[in-house]
Amino acid sequence: MTRKEIAALACDELEKLYPDVKCSLEFSKPYELMFAARLSAQCTDARVNIVTKKLFAKYPTLQAFADADLSELEEDVKPCGFYHTKAKSLKEMANQLIESFGGEVPDTMEELLTLNGIGRKTANLMMGDIHGKPAIVTDTHCIRISNRLGLTNKKEPAKVEKDLLEVIPPEISSHFCHQIVQFGRDICRARKPLCKECRLSYFCRYDLNNKKEA
């Protein structure tokens, strides 16, 4: 079975399982998603949502973030960990968005990567969820499951992204990534994946190889 054939089956099964799945980070403005994503590094989305509910109420505009007292902002984001770096990023991103992009979140990878603390993963999230462009968010779930299914044999995020862009239809690529994250949380866990309950097991190379070895 080719990678494209595996991808087609995976997309079909994931759509049946999670037709309405969305990003688990909560936001009401485009830049809030980017800020939440920055805070989510080495932190759970659930905890980030608790923090941002208060954070976005306290700092309701980009200008409020730009003008924030850094030490106070550090305390506000402290529950997310790495709070010195993350607070500095939020404040600097706010200034960059105001000064360089007129307060709007840019819609190109090149521009997004100029923002403080933003890498390809978050940039792709913004490209897909905010601007509706083809995007592959290569988080740990995506990398793990793509390898198990046989969609890639790479571990580096940029290389996994490249492989998936070759086989996932661009119009559903962003949605696919949200589906695969939820699938990773529910079924295809890092430890002890629930292969017996998995609707993808009939074409999954990981499960098929395990059955051969049994």
Image (spheres, rainbow, N blue to C red):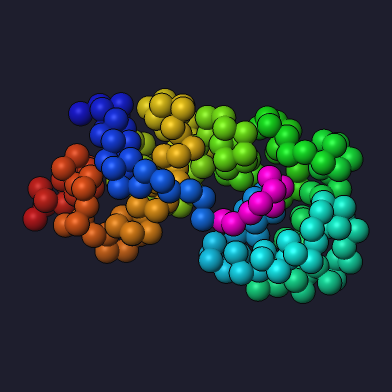
Q: Position of residue 200 (x, y in %)?
A: 23, 45
Q: Is residue 77 visible?
A: no
Q: Is residue 210 visible?
A: yes
Residue under the point 20% across and 29% down: 1
Residue under the point 32% across and 36% down: 11
Near-viewer residue (134 or 189)? 134
Res 2 quadrant in image = top left
Residue 110 placement, left or right of 63? left
Residue under the point 46% across and 52% down: 140
Near-viewer residue (177 or 19)? 19
Above or below 159: residue 198 = below
| Number of marks in the rendered image | 0
- Residue 189 highlighted magenta (yes or no): no
Above or below 22: residue 53 = below
Res 54 quadrant in image = bottom right
Q: For the C terminus, give its image quadrant.
A: bottom left
Q: Position of residue 186 (x, y in %)?
A: 33, 59
Which residues, given as a range, are shown in magenta? 25-32
Magenta: predominant secondary structure element?
A: loop
Residue 18 placement, left or right of 65? left
Res 190 quadrant in image = bottom left
Q: Position of residue 27 (x, y in %)?
A: 63, 54
Q: Position of residue 207 (x, y in %)?
A: 19, 49
